[in-house]
Amino acid sequence: MVNDMNAMTPEWTQEIGRRREGLVGLRRDFHRHPELSFEERRTAEIIAERLHAAKLEVRTGLGRTGVVGVLRGDRPGRTIAWRADIDALPLTETFDAPFTSSKRGVMHACGHDGHAAIAITLAEILAARRREVPGTAVFVFQPAEEVFGGAEPMIAAGALDNPRVEEIYGLHLTTQTAVGQVGIVSGPSMASADFFDVHITGRGGHGAYPHLSIDPITAAANILLGLQNLVSREVSAHETAVLTVGQIVGGTKHNIIPASAVMRGSLRTFNEAVRGQIKGRLADFAAGIAQAYRTEARLTFEGDGCPAVVNHERQTAFVRECATAELGAEALNPGPPVMASDDMSLFLRQRPGCYFRVGIAPTDGGPYPHHAPEFQMNEDGLPVGLRLGLAVMLNALGA
Ligand SMILES: [Zn+2]
Ligand SMILES: [Zn+2]
């Protein structure tokens, strides 16, 4: 660990200024050509091309469409990874700009276009000054973050091995924070996420004669309310958990009682024990309420879900020192952990590190929420993220 953290030398910061236009251009290119989870072929191709051109060792096809670039500095040092996610979302963009998504129904509405552009530019800067770079930088471009599907297969494919990565860092851009501000939270900083389906089976019939049928809609309504009480009655008031039912499907008409209904929901928390506790109770709880209404409920989870992002204390303190040296203490936004989720958590279970937030809030009052068709970023935040990323990598590699 570096003891007295100094800001980067002017030679390094000039590199950022020189590449600012290219950084924004690259982000706009990704924005114009968004690709859904595990379909990031064009994006991966551009990443691989740029890394090749910068003379990194490039591996493609990790976790299907992931890319890893390895940059060996000329000086001895440590092996540090930088992770960026690269996928877009199934949304139709409403913002009108020359770089608006060219694909109807697909949109970079989470800032991953910016993450990819920052990571590429970061690799290119280090490559351009390789003689001064200590250690080995590993750039992990991960597909399919939005479906929590990309991190695990990339880890399984050896993204953190050969060379063996010692620590991992990365950033998420956020429109909830002003440009120039960064959020660096030690410990749990983003929530876990588990998605579940509840299938409720009854017996259909005429709406006028409910006593002759078994109504799954009424059962669904009571299960929905009950699930909220499960959180409020069984989770300690000192813990945080959010359970949301985002979809209910059932029935066809005003006066027909359908035979079945389906509810889909998500569970988020910061504590692995609480997560296990609620997950363990959900199926029994839903089934119990269903039974009271003579229906049957079967609750299933979609995959393994995504654990909470838990930043490691020492590495988080280190990123905070870098941010203070580069951006000033006033840039540190003490904001709370966020309920959104990110499968960066799986990398942070493998190696110590820190995943931090960088502000991109537009100045015209917004809001421009992530995962919404009206999402927009203030591109002035991109060089801020690049600068902090560069400082983190340089100091970690040489520490
Ligand atoms: Zn997202
Ligand atoms: Zn995201």
Image: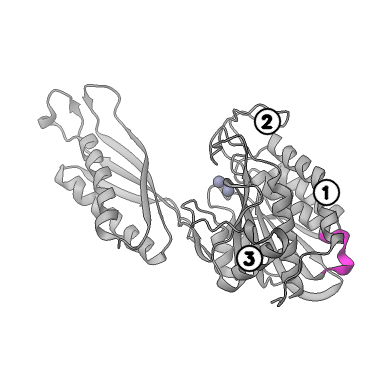
* Quadrant where the image shows the N terminus: bottom right
Residue under the point 45% across and 57% down: 192
Mark 3 closeness class: few <14, some 14–19, many ≥20 residues within 10 Å: many
Q: Main secondary structure of the magenta part?
A: helix
Structural distance between the alpha carbons of marks 3 and 1: 24 Å
Q: Is residue 53 magenta?
A: no
Residue ID for mark 3: 320
Numbered badge on residue 100 = 2
How far across and how far down the image is residue 210, in percent? 13, 29
Q: Amino acid at mark 1?
A: Arg
Q: Which type of secondary structure does the marked residue at label 3 adopt?
A: helix
Disc 3 to disc 1: CB gap under 8 Å: no
Which residue is pictured at 61% across the width and 36% down the height? 107
For marks 3 and 2, give the CA distance. Answer: 34 Å
Chain part drawn in magenta = 126-133
Identify the mark nearer the N-term, 3 or 2.
Answer: 2
